[in-house]
Image (cartoon, grey):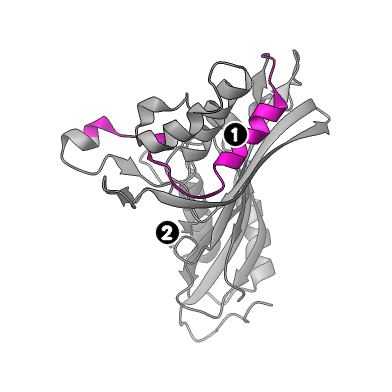
Amino acid sequence: MSTPPQSDGHPQTWKLTLAYDGTDFHGWQIQPDRPTIQGELQSALERVTGESPLPQGSGRTDAGVHALAQVASFALSAPIPPENLRRALNRTLPLAIRVSEAKTVPSTTFHARHSALAKTYEYRIFLGETCSPFHARYVLPCLWKIDPVLLQESARIFLGEHDFLSFAATDPERSARGAPAILDEDGDEQGSGPGSTLRTIFSSAWQERGSEAGALLVYRVRGNGFLHHMVRNLVGTMLEIGRGQLALDELVKILAARSRSAAGPTAPACGLFLHSVEYPQE
């Protein structure tokens, strides 16, 4: 249960869980003159409470990426009951953003990103010729013949700790300025030395699901952290293997190459969802 809000004006740490359709937003991070999730949430908090904290997300989802349970943290002095804040925010936010839970946390050191232990992402692929327009914004349509066995075997190769530099987005402009060209999903800089791009994957698997939209292939991956575009690059490379454009045994070589050019294409943002974020028990 959450701690009752203080009424003496001392700031209280808040934790929000929210879902959003990222199609019409330029990602999580606030940008001038562009709609973003962080910007909309900050504006809604100001309208509701009169305070304008900058919510910190568990990760900076890219433009077009969705979330089922993104987590945000911030501090407020207003003594508002959690359920009242949740309802007020949902009345104020765009319909594409919904707050499912609002709570105060007893620890002033809680931070949505720094306190996270693990995150789970899903990537959804529609199998078939005609996807419903009510689902098309949330899947990658796939007309190729895909070998599910090759997909599953490729997903298993990522289990454990690996250097995922080959699956990280690079920024040539940053490199030209002498800055680290690799970012993690939170926008933090990653140096070019070995170890800075190590990540541990706890689970990595594909499954086929039926839905109102039709047959879906869903890749679910859980890890202690992810590099920028890492999940989308993993998916793009596995699809190349599944459709026979890349041999399965090349995947180990791609990991060892530590070069983005060795891996496959980046899958589109529309099929990616931040599924959940895990924290120490409060």
Closer to us: 28 or 273: 273
Q: Secondary structure at mark 1?
A: helix
Query: Residue shown at 54%/69% (left/top)?
Result: 14
The relative height of residue 122 versus residue 79 in the rendered view (above or below) is above
| Drawn side of residue 208 relative to residue 77, left or right | right
Looking at the rendered image, the quarter that the N terminus falls into is: bottom right
The residue singled out by tag 2 in the image is 54
Residue 251, percent from left and from top = 50, 31
Dot 1 amino acid type: Ser
Q: Is residue 15 above or below residue 240?
A: below
Position of residue 264 measured from the top left corner of the image (x, y, whole percent): 47, 25
**Where are the magenta residues, as a range?**
144-173
Which residue, given by chain and number where applicable, does mark 1 sit on? 154
Q: Residue at x 46, y 82 (%)?
A: 10
Is 50 colored magenta in this rendering?
Answer: no
**Residue 145 magenta:** yes
